[in-house]
Image: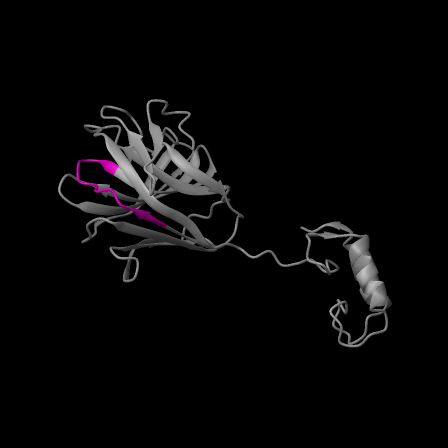
């Protein structure tokens, strides 16, 4: 939980939900001044991923906000959000880079709580989807022009700094990473522990000369000196 720039906000656990709260009259929006909304984040690899959250909280007052934040650094991030415009729920996609903000998508969604929100990253393409039941989904905007070196992802609650700044409590039932980039094992890491060490060397030497064995790193058909050279060249931590 990070509320360093919004110390009057709070996080509480209801027993089934995480409750992120911002008070009325505060300035808790993730926009051009930087990240100002309280958030719960986790680190992810900078690669393709698919995340989902379920928000049980209604957004109706202008502008109550809840959604995903995708961070590169405090001044470079993406917002994928459901917010209230005073009468209905809206889906938003925005990018903030070094003090400059761009809104890519801003359109109403015909849903009432709970709000399920999904985000899929594929390269530099980001696709947002919403659902009222977690089964039937509708796309709620996509962008493909904002590559980002992702360091963390998470959920937040906010309000708009230039309007009435209503209070809001985002009730997060769950947040999960559906899929992350799968790191490919490096050649020579025969025991798949993330490093090439003597344990891998022992496995290779124990299979020396065997045919169609897992220690046949170069798929030549036989465990031999070529495989040994590959293992030794990757000695140490895998990338």
- At x 79%, y 55%, the residue is 199
Q: Is residue 66 magenta?
A: no
Q: Is residue 56 magenta?
A: yes
Q: Is residue 2 above or below residue 111?
A: above
The N terminus is located in which quarter? top left
Task: Please provide percent x and percent y for residue 164.
Answer: 19, 28
How many discs mark residues in the rendered view? 0
Question: Is there any visible trace of residue 113 in the rendered image?
Answer: yes
Question: Is there any visible trace of residue 37 in the rendered image?
Answer: no
Left or right of 185, for residue 59? left
Tell me where the magenta segment starts and ends, as one range: 53-64
Structure colour scheme: one colour
Left or right of 13, for residue 58? left
- At x 82%, y 70%, the residue is 223
Magenta stretch: dominant secondary structure: loop
Query: Between residues 206 and 84, which one lies in front from this camera angle?
Result: 206
User: Residue 210 is drawn in which quadrant?
Assistant: bottom right
Q: Is residue 68 above or below residue 186?
A: above
Task: Please provide percent x and percent y for residue 96.
Answer: 38, 38
Task: Please provide percent x and percent y for residue 7.
Answer: 37, 22
Query: Which residue of the protein is positioned furthest toward the left in this rendering?
Result: 87
Q: Is residue 38 above or below residue 218?
A: above
Left or right of 223, for residue 18? left
Task: Please provide percent x and percent y for residue 192.
Answer: 68, 57
User: Residue 166 is drawn in which quadrant?
Assistant: top left
Query: Which residue of the protein is positioned furthest toward the front in this rendering?
Result: 15
Q: Is residue 156 above or below residue 121?
A: above
Query: Between residues 74 and 26, which one lies in front from this camera angle?
Result: 26
- At x 33%, y 22%, the residue is 8
């Amino acid at each position: 939980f990070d509320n360093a720039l919004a110390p009057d906000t709070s996080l509480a656990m209801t027993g089934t939900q995480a409750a992120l709260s911002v008070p009325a009259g505060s300035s808790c929006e993730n926009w051009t001044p930087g990240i100002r909304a309280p958030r719960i984040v986790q680190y992810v690899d900078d690669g393709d991923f698919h995340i989902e959250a379920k928000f049980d909280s209604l957004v109706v007052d202008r502008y109550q906000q809840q959604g995903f934040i995708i961070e590169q650094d405090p001044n470079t991030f993406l917002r994928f959000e459901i917010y209230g415009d005073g009468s209905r729920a809206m889906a938003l996609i925005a990018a903030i880079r070094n003090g400059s903000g761009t809104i890519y998508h801003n359109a109403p969604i015909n849903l009432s709580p709970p709000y399920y929100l999904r985000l899929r990253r594929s390269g530099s393409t980001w696709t947002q989807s919403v659902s009222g039941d977690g089964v039937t989904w509708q796309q709620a905007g996509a962008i493909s022009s904002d590559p980002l070196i992702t360091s963390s992802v998470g959920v937040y609650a906010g309000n708009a700094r230039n309007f009435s700044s209503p209070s809001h409590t985002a009730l997060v039932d769950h947040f999960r990473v559906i899929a992350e980039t799968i790191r490919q094992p490096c050649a020579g890491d025969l025991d798949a522990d993330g490093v090439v060490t003597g344990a891998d060397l022992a496995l290779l030497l124990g299979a020396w000369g065997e045919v169609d064995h897992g220690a046949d790193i170069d798929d030549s058909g036989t465990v031999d000196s070529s495989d040994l050279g590959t293992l030794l060249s990757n000695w140490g931590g895998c990338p």
